[in-house]
Amino acid sequence: MRIPWTRLIKGAVLLAALGFLAALVHSQWTVLQQYEWRLAPGWALAALIGIELAWLFEAATWRMILTGLGGVLPIRQSYLAWFLSNILRYIPGNIWQFLGMAELAHEDGVPRLVTLTSIVLHQVISTAAGVVLAACFFALFGNGDWLSYFRPLLLMAPLGLFLLQPQMLERALNWLLGKMGRPSIRVSLSWRQIWALVVRYLVVWLLMGLSFAALVRAVTPVDWPAVAYLVASWAAAYAIGYLTLLTPAGLGVREGALTLLLFPIAPPGVAAVIALVARLWMVLGEVLAAAVVLAVRATGRRRR
């Protein structure tokens, strides 16, 4: 009987991350009770609208990649595949979201391999843009002793974007597909198109970061100079949670990273609460978006 080490490690990481948050909240419970909480409904609504707009723009950007690979998917169906599959990423395994997108797109005639390839390109370019955004901010404006060691590395992060050349991406993807016993594909995106995608993903990260800043402002007072820090912190925590690949949708890992990044501008207990509220905010936004696309789909079917 083989021991499922991978599952055990993932479970241990998730429990450790959630335990860290629980212990932090417990240790700061007295401070949290005395803290003057003020919920600003206007800022909370702005945060929810902002994250939905960011996802709409991100879904449209993914559709551009899919089209560049030869996959023709109507815009309504692309939003359906995007927002419905978002719910699946909370299932343990980290693959169900991608398989869900592939199956939904396949119903409209897009080959599964083309969809999966577009998702890989989307994840690579989007993550690279988010990492560069966060690295540049912390390298230029961040404070702390740890930055003295990592600042040169952070300043070199933008050079990683030059690895996103079409030929290099094509070779890497075909090597991966070959290991999986799948046929090779051709990345028909040009160098100019890839840079245009990088710019669009930077806009997505800015929209998401500003929406997160609005969420923080809805919970606790925040100075305007801290907005840029919140944008960079959100991008960094999101990327860390995604790149670990240990928990579904970075659950626990993202919250732990975000809590640590918020220490300079918020008390530890407040930072942990904000990180947990941010997860609930994301889940609420994803559920609302999925409900809307399902309603639109049902309305279209009834009309036909």
Image: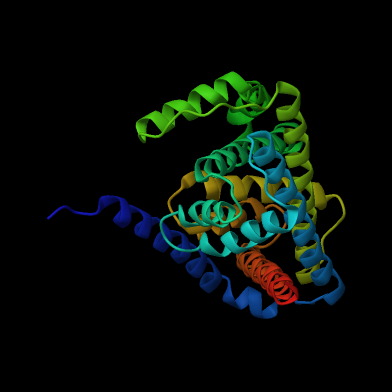
Q: In which quarter of the image is the C terminus?
A: bottom right
* Between 177 and 75, the one nearer to me in the picture: 75
Q: Quadrant of residue 130?
A: top right
Total marks drawn? Answer: 0
Residue 143 in view (yes/no): no
* Rendering coords of residue 203 (x, y %): 79, 43
* Rendering coords of residue 277 (x, y %): 65, 69
* Between 164 and 155, the one nearer to me in the picture: 164
* Rendering coords of residue 275 (x, y %): 62, 63
Q: Is residue 280 above or below residue 185?
A: below
* Rendering coords of residue 286 (x, y %): 65, 66
What residue lies at 67% left-to-right and 63% top-to-bottom?
Answer: 267
Left or right of 228, for residue 99? left
Q: In which quarter of the image is residue 63?
A: top right
What residue lies at 79% left-to-right and 77% top-to-bottom?
Answer: 39
Q: In which quarter of the image is residue 222?
A: bottom right
